[in-house]
Structure formats: C-alpha cells, structure tokens
Image: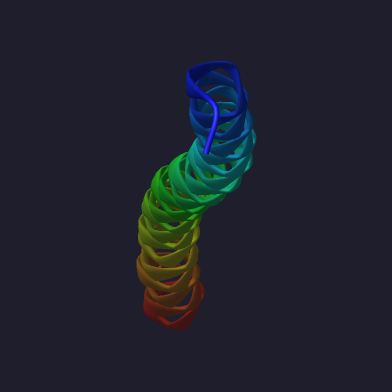
Amino acid sequence: MNPFEMVAIIMVAVTIMVIVRSKYDAASKSRKHAGDDERVEARQLREEVQQLKDRIKVLERITVEKENSLSAQIDDLRDR
C-alpha cells in the first residue's frame, strides 16, 4: 500500500469520526436542554401551586370571618 493512500484512508477515517462525534454531541446537548426545560416547568408549577395554596388560605380566612360576623349579627338581632 502506498504511503499516500494510507494517509488518505486515515484522513477519511478521522473525518468520519469527527462527523459522528459532532452529531452525538448535538443530540446530547438537545437532551440536556430538554431536561432543563422540564426543570424550569416543574419549578413554575411548584410556584403556581404555592400561589394557589396561599389564595385558598385567604379565601378560607375570609369565609370564616364572614361566618363569625354573620353569627354575631344574628346573636345581636336575637338580643333585641
């Protein structure tokens, strides 16, 4: 085998390996980016759930206060 042929074969093999590796790296980065998106979405959902819990607490407090105030008004009417 001619030395120039050997160099050409090595260069082709290296080129193929570089192409395959770059495609693998791109696919790996894409999967990593998808994982980041899922983490961001999970964090946003946790924040939304916390906000909804806080709103429920406020609504419960308002409801209890209204019930207590209504009971007090009924009692005042009975005392008259």
Residue 64, image quadrant: bottom left
Please state the total of marks drawn on the protein image. 0
Q: Residue at x 50, y 70 (%)?
A: 70
Instruction: Pick out the residue farthest to the bottom.
Output: 78
- Tell me where residue 38 appears, x and y as whole percent: 51, 53
Q: Residue at x 53, y 46 (%)?
A: 24
50 vs 18: above or below:
below
Closer-to-camera residue (43/6): 6
Relative horizontal placement of residue 12, taking residue 41 as reference (left or right): right
Q: How is the image coloured?
A: rainbow
Residue 60, image quadrant: bottom left
- Tell me where residue 27 appears, x and y as whole percent: 59, 47
Closer-to-camera residue (29/16): 16
- Tell me where residue 49 appears, x and y as whole percent: 45, 58
Closer-to-camera residue (59/35): 35
- Tell me where residue 54 appears, x and y as whole percent: 38, 50
Q: Residue at x 40, y 45 (%)?
A: 43
Residue 69, image quadrant: bottom left
